[in-house]
Amino acid sequence: MKIRRLLIYDIDYKPLMNGVDLFFPKTEDSFIHANCFIGINGSGKSQILELIAEIFLYLDGLFRQENKNEKENSPFGFRIEYEILVETAKYLVIIDCEKTNLKKKEIIIEIINSGGESIAFEIDDFNKFLPSKVIGYTSGDNETLSLPFDLYYDEYAKYTANRALNSIKFKEKYKDAVDYEPMLYFMNYNTNLGITISSLIFEDTHPTIAIIKKELQIKKLTSFTITIQTNQRNAPFYSTKGDGGIKLTTELELWKDKLIKCCPKAVQDEDDTKFKRWILEYELDEVTIKLFKHHFNSPLELYTALYKLELLNNLIIKDDIVKKIKSDRKERKLVTRMPMVSEDDKVLSYSELKLELENGSIVDYLSLSDGEHQFLNVFGTISMIGQDNCLFLLDEPETHFNPKWRRTFISTLKKLTDGRQQDMFITSHSPFVVSDTKKENIFIFKREKDKINISEPSQETYGASFDEILKMAFDIKIPISEDSLLFIQELENSTDIDLIEKQIKELGESYELSSLHRRIEFLKSLNN
């Protein structure tokens, strides 16, 4: 998977993006070359990630086998071109969706084989020419990037609930409907727990996780608790008799049963039966690990089971609130995020996750730093999702990293993705990331009044000094913080040699410090 071009024809709710036309380089290397968007805050970097997610949200709804949105129009006019691997052969897919009138945006698709010839295809089979996964991540509470994923979750949760209910209203519509694999995955603090659990249980069959464990000095996962419940008090159709609540599909019942079978100590008391609740306390001994490997084929399969159950948390939110927020989303109002569901009301929740470190100490996952959480989340996700044709959209994935981890971000990424057919877009403010990226993969964003200017660096960025990178990307010509720079500039304008010599001792080493020494020598020469 490799996106080669993104063109935005017109987009009513993001006018700054109108006319954006980006071309991305092709690479023959065996690892991911991330396309890196840099620039100051508010320059439009995250919006491009959101638009890419929206495009594939729309295309997945049109072409997946189940729960199609056949009447849905594209939210904006676009053209996207990408290479994709299908059954060992590479194809170039061109999708053009230009606005033809105010109500409809016509979609035109062309698939070109490696010989440069357009091929015929059945529209019902086009889903195999779409990415296998689109994974979003943001380091903060970024509604811009999360919005397409939130819409996807609402849609999947409602479809699953309607199939499970099998009510008179939906019986005919859903009688032959089956579950489907979600294309869009959004990674945040909550999902990080599922990623950590899945990766560390399968660590011996999942070799790249060793890179992450070594850096964080983690020896192993020792224990964790998962709570699954469907008749909690705020659940739809809650019943005091214990026979109501959220209905699970056959597939989700199977996943739930497998999770229960992996917990040798699984028991229910009277309250648990009433609320259809299982509190699964796992001790990660040899027996438990074997049970997980017996019931789940890979870390991604285990994570997918957890993820699908987590998506049902959206069903706890009242219908009138959901309808109001969906209406606001369509009108592109600021309030777009669904309310947080309390831990007591979630269909699936995690707790008591314990890790043993290399020094032998046992720590709670919550005691890890923000940087360690982010390291596990970002690199754990990349390590776990190794299938071809995945697309990663990472918004500032190294924000909480210390300088050492920022310095090794790209080299760690290369180690984790060697041999993969995947693509990645990241936003960053880090000179470390830019200095490890070729100029053709760097896009500098600058906002100029009513438009966004996106340009290529004027010179090579790979191996460039931070001085040059800060100058190119952020218009910082002198790489010193403002307060100390003003202090130095005041001294440079002074004619008092004694004052300069006294205060120069308060400054660290820099090129500007050398200029002050030259200033002193100059003033002394004048006095002589």
Image: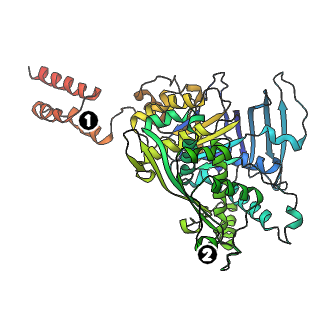
Mark 2 surroundings within 10 Å by alpha-carbon count, few (fewer than 14), some (14 through 19), many (20 or more): some
The residue positioned 59% from the left and 26% from the top of the image is 440
Query: Does residue 372 appear left or right of residue 9 in this picture?
Result: left
Residue 222 horizontal/vertical position (percent): 48, 48
**Residue 493 drawn at (x, y percent):** 22, 34
Among the two numbered marks 2 and 1 on one chain, the one whose residue lies closer to the N terminus: 2
Residue 291 pos. (x, y %): 62, 47
Residue count near mark 1 (Cα–Cα under 10 Å), binned few <14, some 14–19, many ≥20: few
Image quadrant where residue 199 sits: top right
Describe the colour scheme in one phrase: rainbow
Q: Are marks 2 and 1 in contact (CB under 8 Å)?
A: no
* Residue in view at x 65 percent, y 27 percent: 25
Residue at image mark 2: 233
Q: What kind of residue is marked 1?
A: Gln
Q: How many marks?
A: 2
Q: Quadrant of residue 508?
A: top left
Q: Can you see residue 50?
A: no
Closest to the observer, 448 or 119: 119
Residue 229 coordinates in the image, percent (x, y): 63, 66
Question: SS for tag 1?
Answer: helix
Task: Report the side of 298 relative to 492 (left or right).
Answer: right
Q: Is residue 22 visible?
A: yes
* Type of amino acid under label 2: Arg
For disc 1, the marked residue is 489
